[in-house]
Image (cartoon, rainbow, N blue to C red):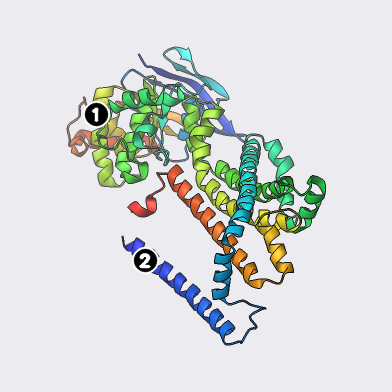
Amino acid sequence: MAELKVRGVSKSFEGKKIIENISIELHQGEIVSLLGISGGGKTTLFNVIAGLSSPDQGAVYLDGEEITGKPGKISYMLQKDLLLPYRTIEDNVALPLLIKGEKKREARKKVGAYFEEFGLDGTEKKYPHQLSGGMRQRAALLRTYLFSDGVALLDEPFSALDTLTKNSMHAWYLNIMEQIRLSTLFITHDIDEAILLSDRIYLMGGKPGKITDEIIIRERKPREKDFNLTGEFLDYKREILEKLKM
Amino acid sequence: MKRKLRSTTGKLWTLAAIAVILIIWQLASATGLVEGYLLPSPVSVVKALIKEFPVLMEHTAVTLKEAFLGLLFGVSLGFVTAVLMDRFSRVYQAFYPLVVLTQTIPTVAIAPLLVLWFGYEMTPKVILVVLTTFFPITVGLLNGFRSADPDAINLLRSMGASRRQIFWHIKFPGALGAFFSGLRISASYAVVGAVISEWLGGFSGLGVYMTRVKKAYAFDKMFAVIFLISIISLLLMWGVDLLQKKCMPWDDRKETK
């Protein structure tokens, strides 16, 4: 069970309202995207959900328990991989376990079991700068997964990658999500990415930022390799572009 | 590989320049262009160095002991100061200007006072070394702590990390590079600081030896000890570099790329 509920969250900075009355839900095993332009308050909402800042109004619930303003419950991942340059990949990935107070050796053993599944085998003893951008994001996702209680926030995790790497990362990501069933709230400004990866999409817009619409992507998973070339995909895209115009 | 080759040829140029200077210097002395008692020739300096070597080593041991003790306390003090300043902004506001102020006090001016207060033994020398070495460490570490990526700190916070965990996982390792830059400077300051404090009173040490040979107008020995101090400082800096490589094995970017 891992269900996230955000209820009526508003947040201002320096007297300016950034997000207003945002309510979203994320069910077990779902990938839900939050799609909107950059600077639309997505990251503010993100910080509230992660417990890094408290909302002015509203609350965040994880499996029915209120976690508003409490970090340590929901894991997240950014566009920057934030792998520590002075730690090997395995120690980077083991970081959340070390923070929880596990012994280094046990933590390493535990994380080692995931390396193959995440396509990271052979990188255990390497340092982040020896890996490509795509591989670093894989490691970052594994770290995110390991410190999650089943819910993760991903803030434009693939937007810094080049197109080809991004495409292969999308395929990899969908595949890995089939296996680990991590409930994910995926923040992006890339419409194609949102349609390709999500079960549902929340559209966010306006100033202050609000949820303006919700779109359900009915294409079943695992998705066809060329789903993004089909007519249905384009229909979704057209619908979203229409609704984002408002 | 190429880089290595380039750095070796770079070193060759340095060595060549030193050789040229020494040759000119030797010629100037040998031809009588400069009087030998005013500026001894490199050869006579080396001779003096060899002849005086056992005595010099005894004095070196004393100076090094002062330098190391001072450096140890200086580094510890610098570390504690930097940590407190980073943790409490009030401490930073209150003491940072004072820390800067201590660096404006000329070492030579304060050394005799220290001798008057603490006597001719080791204490005033160590204190002077502490005063000169803690500053580069404090500033280096503080800058290192402060340049920690706020996103990385947030990430650890979101994992539920305590302040202490954030310090040991993010801030401290992130500041190591800056720390070692500071330590390199401090290590050379430490030797010079110890020598200066020995000038102003003491029973042994390279500074004491220096004042003795100066009074005897034994310029060859004077230069010998100057050479020796330079060599010791260089060796110390090299030692710091080795230590840094040992402590920061991930920092091999220059070689892998």
Q: Position of residue B30 (x, y in %)?
A: 56, 84
Please tell me the numbered disc located at residue B6: 2
Query: Does any portion of residue A34 appear in the rendered image?
Result: no
Number of other residues with Cα within 10 Å of mark 2, as a class: few under 14, some 14 to 19, many 20 or more: few
Q: Residue furthest top?
A: A64
Disc 1: which residue: A117
Q: Is residue B25 above or below residue B228?
A: below
- The percent coordinates of residue B5 (x first, y second) are 34, 65
To which quarter of the image does residue A152 belong? top left
Closer mark to the observer between disc 2 and disc 1: 2
Q: Chain of mark 1?
A: A
What numbered label is drawn on residue B80? Answer: none
Q: At x 39% / y 64%, what residue is drawn?
A: B7
Total numbered labels: 2
Element type at mark 1: loop
> Which of the pair A157/B68 is nearer the observer?
B68
Residue type indicated by callout 1: Glu
Query: In the rendered view, would you say A116 is above or below B257?
Result: above
Question: Of B85 and A147, which appears nearest the observer?
Answer: B85
The amino acid sitting under disc 2 is Arg
